[in-house]
Image (tube, rainbow, N blue to C red):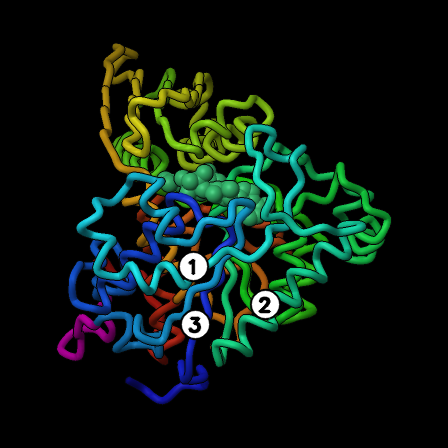
Amino acid sequence: MKLTNVKPADGKLGIMVVGCGAVATTFMTGVLMARKGLAKPVGSMTQYDKIRVGKGNDKKYLHYSDIVPLAKLNDIVFGTWDIYPQNAYQSAIYAEVLKEKDINPVREELEKIVPMKAAFDHNYAKRLDGDNVKDCKNRWEMMEGIRKDIRDFKAKNNCSRIVVIWAASTEIYVPEYEPIHGTLASLEKAMKDDDREHIAPSMCYAYAALSEEAPFIMGAPNTTVDIPAMWELAEKTKMPIAGKDFKTGQTLVKSGFAPIIGTRCLGLNGWFSTNILGNRDGLVLDEPANFRTKEVSKLSTLETILKSDDQPDLYGNVYHKVRINYYPPRNDNKEGWDNIDIFGWMGYPMQIKINFLCRDSILAAPLLLDLTLLSDLAARAGKFGIQRFLSFFLKSPMHDYTKGEEAVNNLFEQYTILKNAIREMGGYEADQEVD
Ligand SMILES: NC(=O)c1ccc[n+]([C@@H]2O[C@H](COP(=O)([O-])OP(=O)(O)OC[C@H]3O[C@@H](n4cnc5c(N)ncnc54)[C@H](O)[C@@H]3O)[C@@H](O)[C@H]2O)c1
């Protein structure tokens, strides 16, 4: 590894996961199993991918950890919050994502991961009812309670660094409201005034994390870090944030497939995406106000890849629809269907059908590992604010707000941005060569 000014990944990294549900426990179990050599962290870029550094005769392909200092799996300590008090073992069994034979070897470690009381507001997820919830007078106190949890966890587990990642249920849609979300001062005032309409519990987690010098990653589509007040806080605390909503199944396919249509200059009339899933996430998303949050996130992908302004003949009239249907028999095994109506030479129509029989949490778990390790890296590299290189992992990426940049959704462009960021942090030149 080259000598750079990125701080080394010494000591323990505390990964504090908001929500101890299907995704969180699949992630934790996989990491604990992998470090015992009992499972492979398949799908994780930080564990598998190799990036070319150097050119011509000097070129070599290296794992991320040979280019930049990354925290090791053995150095991770997990913490969590949930509105249900079940420990991570009980919760993993309840989620029914993994077989017991893949959970039991790390049962003791999982049993020690007991959710702290959640910062929760029933109005934000009406289908949930748990009582492992903080009792607080107002949103400011809620946030202070989370800050204390982070400090206590860090001290108790002797962690040198913390990352907080949201893998809790999707909250109802909170549209950006400039008078409250526009500045840090107005956000803080609203928290103290207990403005429950504009301050979601997730904002309290984000505020607390950034204030405790921990990067914050939003894994659901909640409007939490995509408001100017949070950008201001990230600048002030010099901590990384990113876009939002783990890019796992259908949107991963969409952001990888749409470029095929775009690069060949084929036309698009419509793209209909539907899903059935039966886990608790599906139950929450069955509530229209919670689905709205997801819908906004999922819809943004296509229009920035196939742009109507650039190619009005091809993408000027696209009908894009996304649906999620709660269907209990499928549990975590989501099925997605995409019907894509394209047109070719002289406008002749054609159809493409994609049927993805996926496992939601199996796809999400490696993203939690990559996002936490890479945001910890970014913090040690002195990067703060929105990390565009993490867009690769997110359905709703965000780019430089100071320049009003439009986020890149094209998977392959996102991958180039990711590789270049790793190269640069490793002291190599960023480049656009085809690998
Ligand atoms: N799996 C995927 O492919 C995928 C992709 C993108 C986003 N997500 C998002 O990840 C999140 C987690 O998904 P899941 O399948 O694990 O859901 P889940 O319902 O199994 O787990 C979520 C957990 O969060 C808890 N929770 C809710 N509000 C909370 C709060 N304020 N504080 C602490 N805990 C809280 C719930 O009690 C529940 O245990 C969802 O928001 C989902 O939309 C998942």
Q: Quadrant of residue 432?
A: bottom left
| Disc 1 to disc 3, C-alpha distance | 12 Å
Give the residue pinned by disc 2: 150
Give the residue pinned by disc 1: 389
User: What SS does tag 3 mark?
Assistant: helix
Of discs 1 and 2, which sits in the foreground? Answer: 2
Please tell me which of labels 1 and 2 falls first in the chain.
2
Residue beneath the point at 42% across and 78% down: 12
Which range of residues does the magenta coloring cover? 51-62
| Disc 3 to disc 2, C-alpha distance | 19 Å
Residue beneath the point at 52% across and 61% down: 164
Where does residue 233 sit, x and y in percent of width and height?
A: 69, 62
Crowding near pointer 2: few (<14 within 10 Å), some, many (20+)? many
| Residue 180 sits above or below residue 116 on the image | above
Please state, as top left, top right, bottom left or bottom right, where the C terminus lies in the image.
Answer: bottom left
Give the residue pinned by disc 3: 377
